[in-house]
Image (spheres, rainbow, N blue to C red):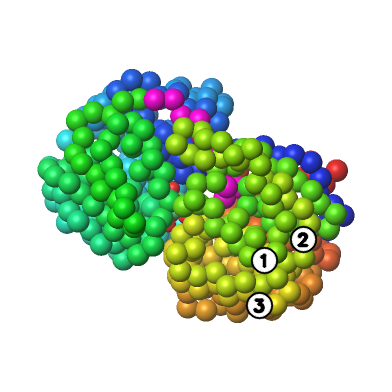
């Protein structure tokens, strides 16, 4: 898809549901007793993969477009799928579901697309095996496909080498079925949607600092879930509003959970004009509207505990940094290398093609801002966040930007291009 410079962005955008929360609503709803009614469910390909996998394990899920009804069958209600479970592009489905499957009284195989088959699964295989799980990589390369044979599980106290909500959640879900109290300690706190939703469904889960603890659980109880808009999707409009001249965008219903709001903190540190309005709670998740106006940005340093709170927003932040004066340093973000693409490489190479002054480092990147970008052919590597970030670059660059594989936005934001376009008219 091709992009050229726009003169302004004006108007309102309603952000589709949060991807992480939508996945969890399906999975935890499947294990609960009763029906979970999920509103503002994200109809992205990743979340549809979660629905598909749990349907294959006997869970009745009605999807009416916006509202999804999950008819839970209790902690032990899943049945053996008679085909391979295919998670598509979804790391969240793969890692969280595996934690559950390790405790089920059946065997199965879980796989996904070419990108998923390159992503590290050793990070869940190691702790789940410590719990007594029988989970192996079919190709013995610590990647999918994974073969899982359910087993009785033991509780562990796991010190995770990575700040990853997918790893933490996988262990906590297995911990629901373990023979004692399970804990996970992370180097920095990752998103806590699992802890909040499991608590809402009646599990005994606590969080202190970077340690989450869960007790074995006899029963989860279904409850209605209103999914807030995804701040990772809102980020493209925050960024677009800040760097596009003459812009004012009202971004409605955005989840601002403090374990996810790093983009707001960075926007502020860069001098961005973002106002948080109408704060309220959707269940246990805080949401708000965001008013964004064109701003003169300055470079900043992003590191440490901030990184997990904006890990998926770093491609977009790398674009903002090109439009800021001064230098932006992103470090402690080696996790970027194992996302849907190697996002250090995909950001740096594509931004170089647009004329940016940017260099890759071992755990991030350094960007010297203020050099105007020009259009280029962008390889999205079928990574939805790369495609969306470079669309925002493209509407602010001289000449034409052509994004290859632009259709991959269906993973997390199927209506992204329409929503962006209506702001420029
Ligand atoms: C997610 C956690 C993050 C994030 C991913 C979704 C989740 O991954 O990048 O898009 O839903 O738990 P890690 O926890 O592996 O960093």
Measured from the top left, where is residue 110 in percent x and y? 32, 45
Sequence-wise, the earlier of marks 1 and 2 is: 1
The answer to whether the residue bearing label 1 lies less than 8 angstroms from the nearest atom of ligand 1 is no
Residue for badge 2: 295
Circle number at residue 270: 1
Can you say whether 332 is above or below 407 in the image? below
Q: Residue at x 62, y 72 (%)?
A: 300
Residue 415 visible in the current orientation: no
Sequence-wise, the earlier of marks 1 and 3 is: 1
Under tag 3, what secondary structure? strand
Q: Which of 5 and 307 is in front in this view?
A: 307
Residue 43 sits in which quadrant? Answer: top right
In the picture, measured across the screen, residue 14 lies left or right of residue 99, that is right
Residue 208 visible in the current orientation: yes
Measured from the top left, where is residue 342 in percent x and y? 50, 66
Residue for badge 3: 327
Please rate how many residues cluster around mark 3, counting C-alpha atoms within 10 Å: few if below 14, some from 14 to 19, many from 20: some
């Amino acid at each position: 898809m091709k992009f050229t410079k726009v003169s302004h962005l004006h108007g309102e955008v309603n952000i589709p549901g949060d991807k992480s929360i939508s996945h969890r609503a399906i999975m935890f709803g499947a294990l609960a007793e009763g029906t979970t009614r999920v509103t503002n469910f994200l109809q992205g390909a990743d979340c549809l993969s979660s629905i598909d996998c749990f349907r294959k394990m006997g869970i009745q899920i009605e999807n009416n477009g916006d509202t999804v009804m999950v008819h839970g069958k209790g902690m032990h209600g899943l049945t053996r799928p008679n085909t391979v479970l295919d998670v598509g592009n979804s790391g969240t489905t793969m890692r969280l579901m595996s934690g559950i499957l390790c405790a089920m009284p059946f065997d199965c195989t879980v796989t996904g697309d070419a990108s998923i088959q390159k992503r590290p699964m050793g990070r869940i295989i190691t702790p789940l095996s410590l719990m007594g799980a029988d989970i192996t990589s079919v190709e013995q390369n610590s990647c999918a496909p994974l073969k899982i044979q359910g087993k009785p599980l033991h509780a562990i106290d796991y010190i995770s080498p990575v700040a990853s909500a997918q790893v933490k959640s996988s262990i906590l879900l297995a911990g629901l079925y373990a023979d004692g109290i399970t804990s996970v300690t992370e180097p920095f706190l990752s998103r806590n949607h699992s802890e909040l939703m499991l608590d809402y469904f009646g599990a005994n889960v606590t969080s202190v600092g970077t340690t989450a603890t869960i007790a074995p659980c006899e029963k989860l109880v279904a409850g209605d879930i209103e999914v807030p808009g995804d701040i990772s999707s809102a980020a493209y409009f925050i960024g677009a509003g800040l760097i596009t001249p003459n812009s004012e965008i009202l971004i409605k219903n955005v989840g601002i959970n403090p374990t996810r709001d790093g983009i707001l903190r960075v926007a502020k540190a860069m001098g961005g004009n973002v106002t948080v309005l109408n704060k309220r709670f959707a269940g246990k998740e805080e949401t708000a509207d965001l008013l964004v106006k064109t701003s003169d940005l300055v470079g900043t340093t992003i590191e440490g505990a901030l990184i997990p709170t904006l890990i998926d927003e770093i491609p977009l932040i790398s674009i903002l940094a090109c439009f800021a004066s001064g230098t932006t340093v992103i470090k402690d973000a080696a996790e970027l290398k194992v996302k849907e693409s190697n996002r250090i490489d995909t950001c740096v190479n594509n931004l170089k093609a647009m004329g940016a002054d940017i260099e890759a480092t071992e755990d991030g990147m350094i960007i010297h801002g203020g050099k105007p970008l020009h259009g280029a052919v962008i390889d999205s590597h079928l990574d939805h966040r790369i495609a969306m970030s470079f669309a925002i670059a493209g509407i602010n660059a001289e000449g034409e930007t052509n994004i290859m594989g632009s259709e991959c936005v269906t993973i997390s934001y199927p209506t992204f291009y329409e929503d962006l376009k209506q702001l420029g008219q």
